[in-house]
Image (cartoon, grey):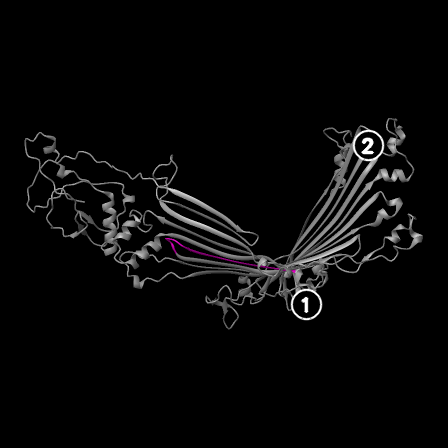
Amino acid sequence: MEIPLKVTQPGSSSEYAIWPKENQFSIPMEVLTKLKAISIRNQTLDRVTYYDGNYNVVSENTPYHAGENRYVIKGNPSLGSVRAMMVGIKNVSGSNGLSGEFWFNELRVAELENHGGWAAIGSLDANASELLNISATGRMHTVGFGSVDQTPKQRALESTQEYDVMMNVNAGKLLPPKWNMQIPVGLSHSQKRSTPEYDPVYQDIKLKDRLEVAQSSSERDVIREQAEDFTLRRGINLIGVKKNLSEGQKPRVYNIENFTFNYAYNEKNHRDYELKYEDEQQVRAGFMYNYAFKPTAFEPFKKVTKFKGKKYWQWLSDVNLNLLPTSVMFTADVNRSFTKQLFRDVYFEGVNTSLQKALPELQQRNYLMNHQYAINYNLTKSLKFSFNATNNSVIRNYYTYDAFGDISGVNKEKSLWSDFWDMGTPDHFFSKFQLNYDLPFSKFPFFEFMRANYTYSGDFDYQRGSQTLLQLAHQDINTLQNGNTHNLTANFTFEQLYRYLGVKPTPRGEKTSVGKSLMTMLKTAGVNYSVTNARTIPGYTQQIGFLGTLKPSAGFMFGDQTDLRYEMAKKGYLTEFADFNDQYISSKEKQLIITANLQPIPDLQINLKANRQYTENYTETFEVRNFVYNKLVGNQVGSFNISTNLLASSFNKIDEYNSAAFEKFKKTTV
């Protein structure tokens, strides 16, 4: 930045003569940013360019005018990066031997921008009876908006406009009432646009300055499009579409009313300074079938009169059998998401843009097909079992393969809707079988004080191997896991037993004898015994079916712990890939918990608890050669915990040399 100087005559004493107004160097910041915007438009940043105060290009030798600034730009200077300034004198007369004395009075920054902004918000809610309702909101703010206690730097540096509209329609009301249809429809639309005050590419230039110097409307649109942060969201959903039962209609297993359908689609379009576009699409579609059977119990001895009133034969009249399952359920849904984005190309000064390789479009797909089914069956009032399974499948229809079956690339032409009903490849399958039986002690008078329950649960888990492992071994290498738990719980209420034996409770207000108190001090007791087994078999080469599998055995899917490794290798179910080193794992845990409540005297209660736990874990490295399972290295670890009665040895004699309790501990420790 240059300005011609007016020389002060010798002997001058007035303020104006010493400090001529023509020598006041005033630099409007907006002029600098506008000149930079012009240089960017003219693509002259790579060379020295002179401008006069009216933004006209001049030469270095163009005559100066008193009081008028001249500007010189080279490169891509940024006002936000200024850390130092240099002031100097330039001789433009062309003569030699000039000398003088120069005074610089002061340097200051004035007229900082401190303008405010404004904001607005609005909302609307409307409905049309039971048919539809609409909710809309809108908000905006301009540059400079902020709270009164914020500094100019803390206030908004962008103007934002956004709105959001949601509409819910009960489309079933548009159909004849006798159809009894339930069709909820949801629509959503939202948009947000944020325009910065400063251009994000050249952050010291105001966006309006770049737009003003643009030479065409198309160039102006490109600059604005790159600077804005824009997001558009749209969606439609139909959740819970079904036909309800008509009045008086009997439910049947084949009725369409047992089905519920769901559909949801959402998309998002976004762009900003870094992203040319980022488009996201999500769709989820599926249905659920659910039917509860009417209880149909077979009770062969219920009406036999000779059993009535006879407490030892009452259990026969309670014998029952349900002929039909309690309920069945099946769900299936397609869940897909597809994202594509393209980053804006970055061009460097001095580089031929035609030789620069453009950035590629990035795509991400996640295509899933999931289904779940469950059966609940109360075989009797005391014996109940259930089975449920979940299958998660992955769809990779966008891969292309070479002659060897390896992935060679991605077909980017595949869209969200391509092969929409493809069932995919099972990726994870989990099933759980559970049986619950209430032991019939309550049916017999002598055992009525006992309540016992037995529960069995069997788990099965299939996990597909990684895609990388598939490429290396050229075969599926999956992992099987199963486990089971046996649990027996029993509770005893001894006051019922005492009454059955004829021991009557002491009337209130009377004192209980010591002998009776001691004989009946045991009030309640509980026993819980559980055994848990688990097994993990890696290297499984077979795939799972739609509903499950009977491999390696039918019992394995229900938690059976029979060792099948050698038989699986013989049938070719285990991989022979030389570099496979996952370990076979088996574990077992047994736990016994006993609790009791004693009340020897009315105001004294004693709670006892005993615990015994044993765990065992075994891991093994193996290999399979020519369909023969070979054990390589095995390792077994475990733990044992048991509670003990400290009172029994608390008062034993002990000194610094001998301890009877410790000697006993050594004898019982391996």
Question: Label 1's element?
Answer: helix
Q: Earlier in the sequence, mark 2 or mark 1?
A: 1
Which percent across, then down, holds residue 373?
66, 59
Task: Tell me the amino acid under the disc marked 1.
Answer: Lys
266 in the magenta segment? yes
Q: Position of residue 25 (x, y in %)?
A: 17, 39
Part of the protein shown in magenta: 259-275
Q: Residues within 10 Å of mark 1 (few under 14, many from 20)?
A: some
Secondary structure that dominates the magenta span: strand
Residue 570 has which mark?
1
Q: Quadrant of the N terminus?
A: top left
Amino acid under label 2? Gln
**How far from the left and from the top, in percent, is residue 384?**
76, 54
Which residue was labeled with disc 2? Answer: 599
Frontmost residue, 589 versus 161: 161
| Residue plotted at (55% across, 67% down) | 474
Residue 614 visible in the snapshot: yes
The single residue placed furthest to the right in the displayed view is: 306
Pointer 2 with pointer 1, Cβ within 8 A: no
Q: Quadrant of residue 461?
A: bottom right
Q: Nearer the viewer, residue 448 or 136?
A: 136
Q: Residue at x 87, y 40 (%)?
A: 497
